[in-house]
Amino acid sequence: MFSGSEFLTCLYAFVGGVGFCVLFHLRGKEIIFTSLGGAAGWLAYLLALPVVGSEVMAYFVAALVLSVYSETMARVRKCPVTVYLLIAIFPLVPGAGIYVTMQHALRGENTLFLSEMMHTLSLSGALALGILLVSSAIRMWRVFRRRVHLNSGR
């Protein structure tokens, strides 16, 4: 199943989130709640990876989880969604992929560059699509609920 090192990476994601909270001048309980989003997203990635078998799909599942968490916590804590989303997405940003892509480009390794670039763009696209789907679904749900509420009053 899971070894201690995988759960340790969730702790690292949490601590990294705390660091970005300090950088963005968040205070109080928001530091804990926003950093938990990063740890939850990373845990979702770790749990999804063996199930879906694809790193891109695991990123997509993690983006769905952290987006739902961010939307929910933003409503509960009366804070902008972007505060939670920005901190929660940091552990999943494919920074190493971007670095390796540029390394191949600078060395003139065109085939490796294109391969790594496509993989990195796929990961980034999976993150963006997961966030887009959740935020759009929640927005549509609120509009639908508001319209039903207005129409039931007639």
Image (cartoon, helix red, strand yellow):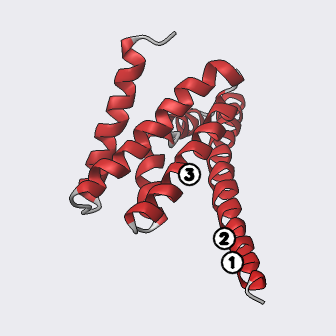
Secondary structure under badge 3? helix
**What's under tag 2, amino acid-wise?**
Arg
Residue at image mark 3: 67
Residue at image mark 2: 142
Residue 82 x/y as whole percent: 47, 63
Residue at image mark 1: 146
Q: Which of marks 3 and 1 is in front?
A: 1
133 relative to 121, above or below: below
Instruction: Say if mark 3 contacts mark 2, CB within 8 Å.
Output: no
Q: Which residue lies furthest to the bottom in this view?
A: 154
5 relative to 120, above or below: above
**What's under tag 3, amino acid-wise?**
Ser
The residue shown at (55%, 35%) is 97
Q: Which mark is residue 75?
A: none
**What's under tag 1, amino acid-wise?**
Arg
Q: Sequence order check: which comes first, mark 3 or mark 2?
A: 3
Distance CA(mark 3)–CA(mark 2): 16 Å
- For label 2, count other residues whose C-alpha is less than 10 Å away and answer few (under 14), some (14-19) or many (20+): few
- For label 1, count other residues whose C-alpha is less than 10 Å away and answer few (under 14), some (14-19) or many (20+): few
Residue 149 x/y as whole percent: 70, 79
Q: Which of marks 3 and 2 is in front?
A: 2
Q: Sequence order check: which comes first, mark 3 or mark 1?
A: 3
Distance CA(mark 1)–CA(mark 2): 6 Å
In the rendered structure, the answer to whether residue 33 lies left or right of residue 109 reads left
20 relative to 6, above or below: below
